Image (cartoon, helix red, strand yellow):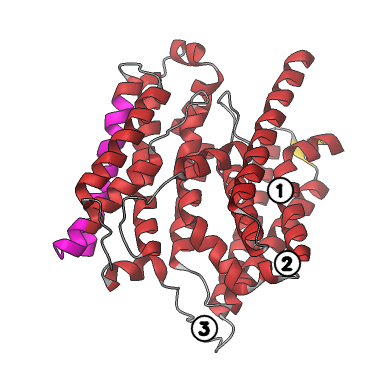
Amino acid sequence: MEKKISFSEILKKYTMVIVLVFVVIMFSVNTKGVMLLPQNVNNLVAQNAYVFILATGMLFCILTGGNIDLSVGSVVCFVAAVGGKMMVLNSMNPYLTMIVMLLVGIAIGAWQGFWIAYVRIPPFIVTLAGMLAFRGLSNVVLEGQTLAPMPDAYLALFNNYIPDFLGGGEGFNRTCFVVGIIVCIVYVALVMKNRADRAKKGYSVESFGGVAVKMVLICVVVLAFMFRLAQYKGIPNSLLWVAVIIAIYTYIASRTTTGRYFYAVGGNEKATKLSGIDTNKVYFLAYLNMGLLAAIAGMVTMARLNSSNPQAGTNFEMDAIGACFIGGASAYGGTGTVPGVIIGALLMGVLNLGMSIMGIDQNIQKVVKGMVLLAAVIFDVVNKRKSFIVK
């Protein structure tokens, strides 16, 4: 059965997408197209890869009831400090070092998750303590110095580009654009399959016209994005890391029982516990996972900077939290999607890039980002109140 969706519902569902498109157009006009130059599109990915990764993990913390992790920036710095000391000072194998960095991140996530899940210390307190402790430990490990450069083998994993296997020649990477086409085909096939499965089971589905418009718009954006990357050097390895993480966590959140537990705990923890779900385990997994993704973000950041320094990761937690709330995650928990968070991260990245190109003062940039974040949370709170009144 097809479900008719009103214009107001469409507007509500795709508000941030519309805002993102508007902001891109606005900056493109004001910078006379400079922002959409191939190199700047590439920079948008490279400079914000850590936000995409951290925001994905932060979403699962927020889903459990509006909880956050304030320590991720410091964890990124500490993991990078450990990795930098192993590779630069001790000349250890980059691949072994990466395994150690991942284990350090997981251990930190487990440590914080234990206090939050099983001792029931508020996440704000535990992660605030972590933010201070791991920033201090980073300085201890690095002895206040910057370690550089990183081994070429390590940098190649994150900073290089996927080769043009189709041989597009200088100036255009055919492989990059073909990948964009394949992504669009797979996306359309998955959307249509999901729609058909829902209809077969008797669930209401969006009208075909609405689905078609959404698919066309998304495919146009994807192809335009990949076309710009193809005009530069192709697909950066950092984008590949981000894409894999997004795909995995989108599947976990929307297709697995464990993923649904996060939404259930955030929606009503008491009812979830009474239904037999181990809510302590859900909290623990949220912060364990955050530690893992903070380690990956640390590896990406260290490669981009080609160094490990005591100031790395500063304010990363704010970027991740902001991306989540701007992308539609509820401040009360139980609501939010990985694609929505990515839209939020993109909006933050576009704002940073656009304002930097226009030469806007750094302090004004912070004011603008703060107002955007506040507006997103106000929008969520107002909608929650309206839905409560309707009920």
Instruction: Please give the name of the residue rendered at 29% of the width and 73% of the height, measured from the top-left corner.
Output: 152
Callout 2 secondary element: loop
Residue 144 picture location, percent across and down: 25, 51
Label 2 Cα crowd, 10 Å radius (few <14 / some 14-19 / many 20+): some
Taking the image as drawn, is residue 103 in sight? no
Three-letter residue code for mark 2: Thr
Q: Is residue 33 left or right of residue 74?
A: right
Magenta span main SS: helix
On the rendered image, what quadrant is the C terminus found in? top right
Towards the viewer: 165 or 14: 14
Three-letter residue code for mark 3: Leu
Q: Is residue 352 left or right of residue 142?
A: right
Magenta-span inclusion, residue 79: no
Label 2 belongs to which residue?
Answer: 31
Instruction: Please give the name of the residue rendered at 72% of the width and 63% of the height, measured from the top-left corner.
Output: 220
Three-letter residue code for mark 1: Val
Residue 98 picture location, percent across and down: 26, 56
Which span is picked out in magenta? 85-114
Dot in front, 2 or 1: 2
**Splitting the image into 4 quarters, where does residue 41 fall?**
bottom right
Label 3 belongs to which residue?
Answer: 166
On the rendered image, what quadrant is the N terminus found in? top right
Residue 44 picture location, percent across and down: 56, 61
Magenta-span inclusion, residue 88: yes
95 versus 338 height, above or below: below
171 versus 391 height, above or below: below
